[in-house]
Image (cartoon, rainbow, N blue to C red):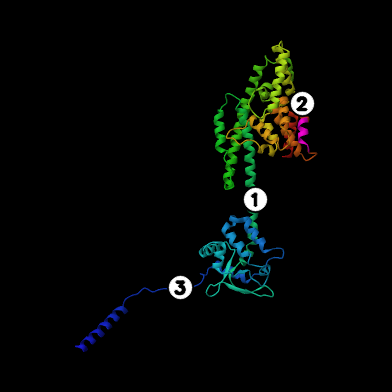
Amino acid sequence: MRAYSQGFVEGLLIDTMHHISHVNLPQVHQYRGGRISSPKLRKSLEQAQDFCGLEEDVNRYDLLLLVKRIGKAAGFTTKMINLLDYYMAFTRDLDWEEGSSPIVYQSLSRTALDLGVSERQIQKLEKALFEVGAITWNDSGNHRRYGQRCQETGRIKYAYGVDLTPLAYLKSALERKLEEKKEHDNAWMETKRQISWYRAQIRAVLAELELIEEIDPPYYELEAAYNDIAIQIRTTMSLERVGELLEEHKELHSLVVSVLDEYGSCEEQSTEANNAPMASKETKKSSSKSDSLGTHYKSTNKKQSNKLDTSKTASKGFQERRSRSSGDKPQRTEQGVSSGVQKEENLILKTGLQHITLKQALNAASDRFKDHMPLEPRPMNWNDFVEAAYSLKGNLHISQNSWSHACVTLGRTGAAICLLLTDQATNRADDPVTKPAGYFNAMINRAKTGELHLHNSIFGILKKEGESV
């Protein structure tokens, strides 16, 4: 019985092994450890072997500066640049000489700890640097990173780790890309400057069109069209998008200028015709367009609670003088009041203020003056211009009393024009004004004697800027 059982078991084992031998088991591929070879990797290793050192006038940090300046245009992200900068600090100038290699043999774990990221993140960044041609690897058999320098010479005896040699071969390509980037950036900035110029022109024309009652297309449509394109220009916008925005501004500028040319002259003729029978002989001699184009110079006659007009002391003194004058001369007639106002208007007319438009004043203003213009979602007006002048007066050391005196003499707009000219006088190349407050007060005193001609000064600035362009 035992012999039978043993024979049965042996026979069963033989049959089972025979059956297993005929079963097709899947073959398991054995992968070897190490970095997968590729044409790009082999080329980088050849570059490392053939490295003859940097040029004499090139420093290793010159290469890093090129990378930082060109950035994303060459495929370098901020994190990639930070890691490259970190690795560069481990190399020395003699590592970039002929016969040496700039190899960073610090362990991957230490690098990850120093930068506060995972080892996997460091590996991804190294791979990205390899893809753009900035690094390669000099691997040991087990991919462990280690090395040693000679204590006497400081040169690397042996090292296994990240090799920065390929970065030296990128120098010419990076310089070409940097020049292309400069051309692109210059074109972008020039396009943005042109847009800013057209926006100032459009706002100035819209400010004039706002005073005209009926135009085609209506004012609100022109204003809405401007608001649609008056978006903030960010550096993230492409050059193509900024160029499209410039063309939109050019089209709108041509439209509003054509509307102003068509309806502005009609409005001027209509206003002159309405005001002609009421004008006195003196007014006819001075200017027939003073009522239509220069109504802003009369703004001091309006009683507004605005700190831009005059100071409290000046207002109180002016009212007291009026009270004493009315008490001493109760018999003063309407004709006397009219003659006083007429005399005040004639004083302003002599300055030529009525010939200056808001557009001309804005074009004659300095960049510093324009920086004080309020940013509102609407076209600019004379109130914005006066507000900018009032805000700038502190920079020119012009006191509140001087500003109030100018407003009483020439009106708020006239005072603002005088401050604009004072600001320009401090910026001129030849004989700049060093005491703007005295210059400003001298202009107001000249206005009292009829020797101040504001329009000639504004036109002179515009002509000079036109010649420089």
Specify whether residue 230 is in view: yes
Q: Which mark is residue 31?
A: 3
Q: Residue furthest top?
A: 331
Q: Which residues are magenta?
A: 433-441
**Residue tagged by mark 1?**
183
Q: Looking at the picture, which amino acid does disc 1 mark? A: Glu
Q: Going by the image, does 103 lie left or right of 36?
A: right
Q: Which residue is mark 2?
A: 447
Q: Foreground residue, 10 or 263?
A: 10
The residue that appears at 71% across and 30% down in the rendered structure is: 403
Amino acid type of the residue that numbered disc 2 sits on in the rendered structure: Ala
**Comparing labels 1 and 2, the label whose residue is closer to the camera:** 2
Residue 256 image-quadrant placement: top right
Residue 397 found in image quarter = top right
Residue 382 among those drawn in magenta: no
Classify 10 Å Cα crowding around label 2: few (below 14), some (14-19), many (20 and above). Answer: many
Could you give the CA–CA distance between mark 1 and mark 3, rounded to whole angstroms? 50 Å
Q: Secondary structure at mark 3?
A: loop
Precedes in sequence: disc 1 or disc 3: 3
Kindly report the secondary structure that dominates the magenta region of the rendered protein.
Answer: helix
Q: CA distance from mark 1 to mark 2?
A: 50 Å
Residue 437 inside the magenta-drawn segment:
yes
Residue 75 at least partly seen: no
Q: Residues within 10 Å of mark 1 (few under 14, many from 20)?
A: few
**Which of marks 2 and 3 precedes in the sequence?**
3
Q: Secondary structure at mark 2?
A: helix
Asked which secondary structure carries label 1, the reply is: helix
Q: Decide: marks 3, 2 in contact (CB < 8 A)?
A: no
Horizontal and vertical percent for residue 236? 57, 48
The image position of residue 68, as x and y in percent, is 62, 57
Q: Position of residue 341 (x, y in %)?
A: 71, 18
- Contact (Cβ within 8 Å) of mark 1 with mark 3: no
